[in-house]
Image (tube, coloured by chain):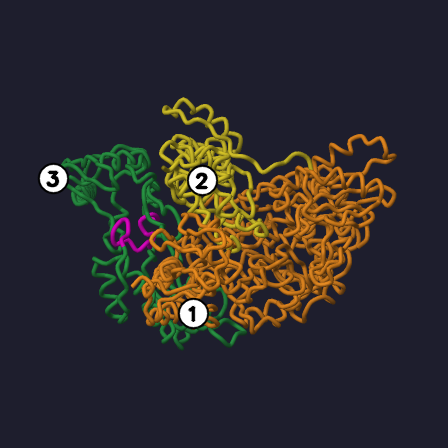
Amino acid sequence: MGECPLLEAIFVQIDINEYERENEYRKLIENYEGKAEHLLAIMQDVQKQYNYLPRLAIQLISDYVGTPVSRVYAMASFYKAFSLVPKGRYVFRVCDGTACHIKNSETLLDRLYQQLGIKAGETTADGMYSVETVNCLGACALAPVMVVNGKVHGKVSPGEVERIVKEYGGQNHGS
Amino acid sequence: MEAKVYKDDRQTVLVCCGTGCTANGGREVFRAFQKRLENHPEMEVLPVIKATGCNGWCEKGPLVRLMPRDITYCSVAEKDVDEIVDKTLLEGVLIKRLLYRDPVSKDHLASHHLTDFYRKQHKIALRNIGEIDPGQINDYIEREGYQALKKALQDMDGQAVIDAVKTAGLRGRGGGGFPTGSKWQSCRDAKGEPKYIICNGDEGDPGAFMDRSIMEGDPHTVIEGMILGAYAVGATHGYIYVRDEYDLAVQYLGQAVKDARQQGYLGSNIMGSELSFDIELVRGGGAFVCGEETALMASIEGRTGEPRDKYVYPTEKGLWGKPTIINNVETWANVPVIILHGAEAFAAIGTEKSKGTKVFSLVGKVVNTGLVEVPMGTTLREIIYEIGGGVLKKRRFKAVQTGGPSGGCIPASLLDLPIDFDSLTEAGSMMGSGGLIVMDDHTCMVEVARYYVNFLAGESCGKCTPCREGIRAMLEILTDICNGKGKLEDLQLLEDISATMQEASLCALGRTAPNPVLSTLRYFRDEYIEHIENRFCPAGICRELTTFYIDPEKCTGCTLCMKSCAVNAITGEKKQVHVIDESSCIRCGECYRTCNFDAIKLARRDRHEN
Amino acid sequence: MKIKLNGQEREAQKGESILELCRRENVTIPTFCYHQAFGGQGACRMCMVEVIEKGRKESRLVAACTYPLNSPVEIITESPRIQRMRRTLVMLLARRADRHPLLKEMAESYDAPHLGAIETKPADCILCGLCIHACEEMGRSAIWSMFRGIDKRIATPYDEAADDCMGCAACARVCPTQAIKVEEAGSERKIWNKTFELIACQRCGKRYATREEIEYLQERSGYQQEHLCESCRKKTLAINMKNYLQ
């Protein structure tokens, strides 16, 4: 096993004029053949690069694969891997799998709300932080689990939340 | 199966780097070993260091095992590495504080094989995990890897492979429990080309991580299984559909497919035979419903994961309308062993109708959380108490949830139930993928039902009326009950809606969605009544129904509850009785669960406030 | 192929659905999401019937619209079990289509309990999916079912005016609860948040189709046509035929 940490989300500054990125989107999209069976993979590559699916990218994907825009959008809205709006630079994902739930993952969300001022599914106004609940990550022995930009924090006690949030400069962000 | 990766005259250090141990610093331990042993003047032969997949004993990680002496060190930190190298590798001395201490005998045990956690296990699907570097195909080959394939290609034909799987009695390990041999036979007999093999790696049950560990820790066993399946039915293309959230699994499977291709196990004319078969990896999009086989196929085809009616099975018309077999990761992992060591040996394990072993993820309020593989027929009591070490903090066992959102809760009275497909179904639950979630008296069973229905409210594809609207209505009712707004008539309504969901839903997600509700109603009806009639939650979980107060006679003033409070609602000096300020209390229950003196009590919220 | 339908022997074509057979044999099965043009979807589940398959003693419930008749089976379309199921389904759907008489009347006829109404978008939508299939058949696919689970709803991308929408309103015509709003005023039609110019018939002056519809038709058929509304087109055709035959 070589160096293979859990992948961290690459955060890219979003330009106001996303049309400048058309060529960049095309480069990613045209890595695959223009067939419907590659829709998922194409969309995932774009999502990982830009932290969301830009409107123009969705249009370009539709044209390239030959699937109507409404159906590409349907896929974007159906699959949780995709986001139609940009997420925060730092995304706090609290696992709500059963093991984590009965070990009171809800209390972690309380603490995050205290620190960041946002609830699950929300992003801070300055675009810096997002809080999400995620489906079981499969690290149940470490319940409750919280992942921040790919880094897994296990057995997180409510008291530790403040410390972890501080690591990303978010303490008292909500006040 | 004693083929070793580690040669007897050369020491090997196996560092667990499964997702759990990695989160706890396993990788740092691995790198520390690498650094320290790069160049050691006192060692003639440098030890081999391997980062392995999940050993299953996540509670005790990061695990480091030293072979060939078979020493297991638990909870190893980076700072322990030097000591391990100097004392154990060089001088052969055991470091007691890193060894596992049996809680009953108080003995320090040198090897994990001697612990209760491992002794009762029988590893088939998990046979290689923790022993090999999953990124090295040669490690797999040294442990009989691809020998089953060689045997099949040389001595058997496709039908013989199917017959072996039939005789072995292998049943699907993903939850359905469908006889694998029959499935393969239907596909072999079906007309249409090309035929497809799919591995369902979309493990979505919350609390289950068996498939993740197999994909991360021993990817080649899945690949070899699939190649054998392709040989059996005459397929040429294969897909491994991996859950999007499993980054490491995607990585290792990708590497393994590449290596297998390079060594001639995938591609044209495999091992010089007439079999041509290759595999493509597909990352899921983050949808639990895509674990359902027709939704999974829709996803591969580039559509939203909406299932279809299965009056015509995928083995006849599957991916792009062609004959397809879809099997779960763990099912595939068993196939090479059946072919290489014989169907009879496999069928000798387990019960009459459930052969072989099953991997369970034992999590929740249990001492030894982790993965366990046991013969079918092992009782719940054995798994939870003998292997699992019993309930955390010695609290009272309340229930064990099996089968995830499709399953049910089994109460203490049924702990001696032998686990197999049929017995669990009769008890109102199901085996499911193998998640076993242990719950204690601080778990509210009504809230558990609400939790599962809430999970499905977001995961249902939403296409069919009974599932979508049934879940919606059940969630409203259960939420009302948890918030003290429930009515007794609601229970009948829950049962009526459940019946329709079971009969009319388009797929198994909808058909089994009522299970957690029905099983908690069956075994814990009194708890529902308590919430509805008395507006009280005996477990202290439902915040609208509960308030907490400190019993001044029992409080020792230890300040532990104060420290656990998120909103600083508790005041008190050391050694003085503490007080909870009810106006700032958010009723999260942390203090209640933290107190070691039973000094914090529950009270009905409305009565207390009035 | 011989099958038994409600105790009577009937002839079925191999591969046809139970629903198709029943419609031909004038046996009524309630449906919401079935349309002859699109076939069975299996979404509303109202059409569930009992079948006893060869070699089995017990019946099982299947969706009539998608179950293919490939072997001799026994079909039962009415039973207390089926009645109870339809009642619950109507009870659940009636919450969504609170204002339209269709679900209200059905709920009454099944004596279904009343559960609180829920707000849907569009209002009264029962998610039968007929609209999206109509749009797909027209070749546009401007709308689709978005999101999933209890939040699932029919919409255009971003809930905005869709480039692919040509304002033909086929979706609105096919909707069983008239959930899709078409606003027409003078020479304008507004649907799915998009405003269209309605073109006037060259003969009678009636505003009959959007510019986009007409252009699309011309593109698909490959030839220019006079702008004629349906009745004027028929009249013109009749006159031409008459002239030709004389």
Secondary element under disc 1, as helix, strand or loop, is helix
Residue visible at 74% across and 56% down in the picture: B337
Find out whether residue C132 is within the magenta segment: yes
Please determine whether, in this image, residue B306 is positioned above or below residue A163. Answer: below
Q: Which residue is mark 3?
A: C204
> Real-space Cα distance between discs 1 and 2?
39 Å
Q: Which residue is mark 2?
A: A82
Q: Which residue is mark 1?
A: B527
The answer to which of B131 and B42 lies nearer the viewer is B42
Find out whether residue B59 is within the magenta segment: no
Query: From the viewer's perspective, is B319 left or right of C83?
Result: right
Please state the horizontal and vertical placement of residue C87, each as a whole percent of the image: 32, 69
Same-chain status of marks 2 and 3: no
Same-chain status of marks 1 and 2: no
| Classed neighbour count for the residue bearing mark 3: other residues with Cα under 10 Å, few (<14), some (14–19), many (≥20) | few
The amino acid type of the residue labelled 2 equals Phe
Please state the horizontal and vertical placement of residue C62, each as a whole percent of the image: 43, 66
Looking at the rendering, the stretch of residues picked out in magenta corresponds to C119-133
Q: Quadrant of the N terminus of chain B?
A: bottom right
Q: Give the drawing colour for chain C.
A: green
Query: From the viewer's perspective, is B443 left or right of B328?
Result: left
**Chain in orange?**
B
Please state the horizontal and vertical placement of residue B544, each as a whole percent of the image: 36, 59
> Real-space Cα distance between discs 2 and 3?
51 Å
Secondary element under disc 2, as helix, strand or loop, is loop
**Chain in yellow?**
A
| Classed neighbour count for the residue bearing mark 1: other residues with Cα under 10 Å, few (<14), some (14–19), many (≥20) | many
Viewer-nearest of discs 3 and 1: 1
Residue B470 visible in the shown view:
no
Residue visible at 41% across and 27% down in the picture: A14
Q: Chain of mark 2?
A: A
Please determine whether, in this image, residue B180 is positioned above or below residue C73. Answer: above
